[in-house]
Structure formats: structure tokens, C-alpha cells
Image (cartoon, rainbow, N blue to C red):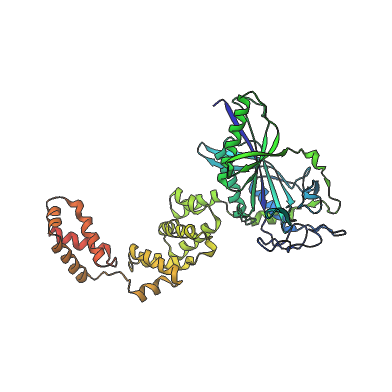
Amino acid sequence: MRYELVVGLEVHCQLSTNSKAFCGCSTEFGKPANTNVCPVCLALPGALPVLNRRVIEDAVKLGLATDCTIARQSILARKNYFYPDLPKGYQISQYEEPVCSEGTVHVDTDEGRRDIRLVRIHVEEDAGKSIHDIGDDTFIDVNRCGVPLLEIVSYPDIRSAREASAYLQKLRQIVKYLGISDGNMEEGSLRCDANVSVRLKGAEEYGTRTEIKNMNSFKSVEKAIEYEAQRHIDVLESGGKIVQETRLWDADKQETRSMRGKEFAHDYRYFPDPDLVPVQIDDAMLESLKIELPEFPEARAERFVREFGIPGYDAGVLTAEREVADYFEEVVRCCGDAKAASNWVMGEVLRTLKENNIPVALFSVSPERLGGLIGLVAGGKISNTIAKQVFERMLETGDDAKAIVEKEGLAQVSDTAEIERVVQDILEANPGQVDQYRSGKTRIFGFFVGQCMKAMKGKANPVVVNEILKQTLDG
């Protein structure tokens, strides 16, 4: 291909604060329209904003996590534009002096690690919501007005649609690890606009860019960027020129369409908000926030490999989400077997969470109970096969593994006399297979093991079964 894709992303991250950025109204999602409001977020005459300290703290945490320069003083500005769902007629944001600037997000791609540079991270308030799907009229819900956001602006360092998706997923992982946002794209907690252009390979000058909005999933980000890049190429190849504009992604038609001409910074007439003093960040605040930073996925995965001796792949899966990593570590503490804990969490636990579409915080089997189940297997009380049955019963009843095993008579049978009797019955019922084994076709041994385990409903000790079968067949 003669062209190179150039992409920069503007990501809006809704913070998980209980109250809005400049008033005490709730930020709870899904409340009845126009109920999370007050004179401040409704912009009633005489109402004055008061900055939520938590918003600045969360911005600084993200800045520290992405190696940004933290401004000791930053300015809150008015960004002026008209939307029907923007009561004030302006949005409180930042422009000339953002709280964080010049950071980096490290992204793993098929081609290796890529460093995506950040221009800035700044705080701002959200606008309301226009509702167009109730009859022929447009309705306004201002619940979201004043909800705190962080806008994360990257340099145009991204070179593929897949890389853009990987970058967005990495940002989501970081904000979730920090605990500053749930990163839920479906509820609008993470929203992304993409600035897309193409240029001939080897060229230094950027092509004319278009901005794409209305992408609400990682897959839609990829699809929209791929479509828009190809549209640019088709226009250029036919001798046309790209118009700088804002375009909407239509997921149903899998295409972008023109929305409006692209605004420039001067169109918004930024100026410092006269109702808000400059934000000051002193040494004490900065140091206290540094202490609150968590152990991030890469470092945690390295520690898991080093400390628990599990494979790198396992460590990567287990640390993808902070809550899952916490759960795994607690299971290890309870059972003392890191590899078994890894297998159970990566297998049965993650499968159950995915099937039920729930976070680990709502998972009904506590780390202590899973650790107890793993301990029963390690102690020879139950087999792995029975353990999976017990796990399903734990999900249904909420009982401990030990109680379920005792109540339902699932303890592993190691009684040699009983196992010898079952082995003898299996061999007598399958003389042809016995002859095959004794003639040298030893791979059929697994058949006998399976038949014995089936006859004893999975409760036989597999080690004892193997020993008795071997002795009997070879004797």
C-alpha cells in the first residue's frame, strides 16, 4: 500500500465520583431524567460552581500513571459553544494550562511494544443528553450536565486501526486499575473520537484529517478508522481533496457520514472562568497521591511469575483486571498452591464470570471457599472431576466445598478392596481389550482407567486405580 495511516485519539473518561465536578448532585447512572440536578448544573442565575477536589486528584493519578508532567498550577476555562443540552452555553474545561501534559501510554501490538505519546490530560464537565427517539420531538435530559470527565489527547502516533483499539483498551485498563472510572463504553464512561488522516509512505507532512465520533466499542473504533482511511485513499486516488470535518460513525451501515465542519480552538473563545480560582498542587498532595498508586499490570505480572512460579501467559491473563488479580492472590494465600489457583481462576472462575456477564466483585464463590476446594483436591479428599461438580454446587448453594462433599457423599474412595473389586469387574467385562493390552497395545490402558472411574462415578482415587490396574493387567 502506498499510504500510511495516521491517527490520534481524544478519549473522554467519566470519573467514578459520587458527586459532579462543580456541585453536589449525584452522578448515578440511569436515574429518571432531570432528577440529578441543582441550580449550579442547571445554570440558574446567581449559582456559583465549587470544584470537586476528587476530580483533580483523579486527574493527577492518571497523569502519574502515564508519566505526565503535573502542572503545579492549572487554569479552568470556559469553552463556549451552543448545544440544546448545555444549559450554561459554555462548558467548564481546560485549554492553555491543563493539569497533566506530555505523557506516554505503552501498548503491546503484534509488531511489539509501541509508545503512544500524550499531548495532555485535562479535566472538564460533561454536557447533557438530547433524546431523539421519543416521537417526533427532541427531549433534553440534563442529568449528565456537570458530570466530571478527563479528556486524554494523544499525539498522532497511532499507525493502524488495531493499534488504536489496543491503545484504548490499555487506557481503560489503567483507569480501572486506578479505580477512577469503570471504563464502561456502553454507558458512556469511556468515549472516543478519532482524528484520521493518510499520507504517502515516507512523507513527513500530515494529510488533512477528519474527526470521527459516535464509536461506543473497541470493535467500532477499529471498523470506523479502517473505513475512514479507505475513504481518504479513494478520494485522493480519484484526484479529490479531503475536507476537514467532523463525521459520525453509522454502525448499522458500517460507514461514516458528514456531521459538520471541523471547529478550531479559536471558535470556542476560551477564557479563564472568573468564578473559579487557579488549581494549586503542592508537594504534599503530589506525594500522597503517588503513595496511593496501585501496582500496575506489567509489574504485577512480572511479580506473579517471579513469586508464584506461574507461566508468563497465566500472569498476563490474571493481571488484566485488578479485581481478578486481587482475587487470585487471595486464593493463593488460602490454599498455598499458585498453579492450581491459576488454573481454577483462569478456567472455571473466568468462564463463569463471562457466561453471567458479572464482575468478580459479584462472584458468589469467595477466594476462601475456592481455596478450600483446591485444598480438598490437594489433600486427596476429592478428584479433579468431582471438584468441578462441587464447584457448580457451590455456585448454586453458596455452601463451602467441604460441607457439600460431606452432605452429598462425594469424598474420594481410596479403599483398595473396593477398587480391586471394580477393577476385576471391568476386566471380566472386557476380555477383548485385556487381550489387546497383554499383546502389547498398552495405549488401551486409558480405556480401563476411564471405565473404572465411570463405574465409581468419578469418586475413585485415580492414583490407586492406576496402581491396581497396572498390577492386575501385568500380573
Q: Looking at this rendering, what residue extends furthest in the right direction? A: 46
In this orientation, which residue lies closer to the viewer: 441 or 83? Answer: 83
Q: Is residue 467 left or right of residue 69?
A: left
Location of residue 294 in the rendering, given as x and y in whole percent from the top left corner: 60, 55
| The C terminus - image quarter | bottom left
Is residue 464 among the parts visible in the rendering? no
- x and y percentages locating residue 358 in the rendered image: 52, 60
Q: Residue at x 25, y 67 (%)?
A: 456
Outermost residue, top direction?
239
Using the rendered image of the protein, determine whether residue 74 is visible from the camera's viewpoint: yes
Vertically, is 420 above or below 7? below
| 417 shown above or below 165 | below
* Image quadrant occupied by the N terminus: top right
Callout count: 0
Residue 145, given in percent of the width and then of the height, sits at 74, 56
Task: Tell me residue 310's x, y (percent).
Answer: 43, 52
At a point 69% along the width and 62% down the height, the residue shown is 18
Which quarter of the figure has residue 262?
top right
Q: Residue at x 78, y 50 (%)?
A: 91
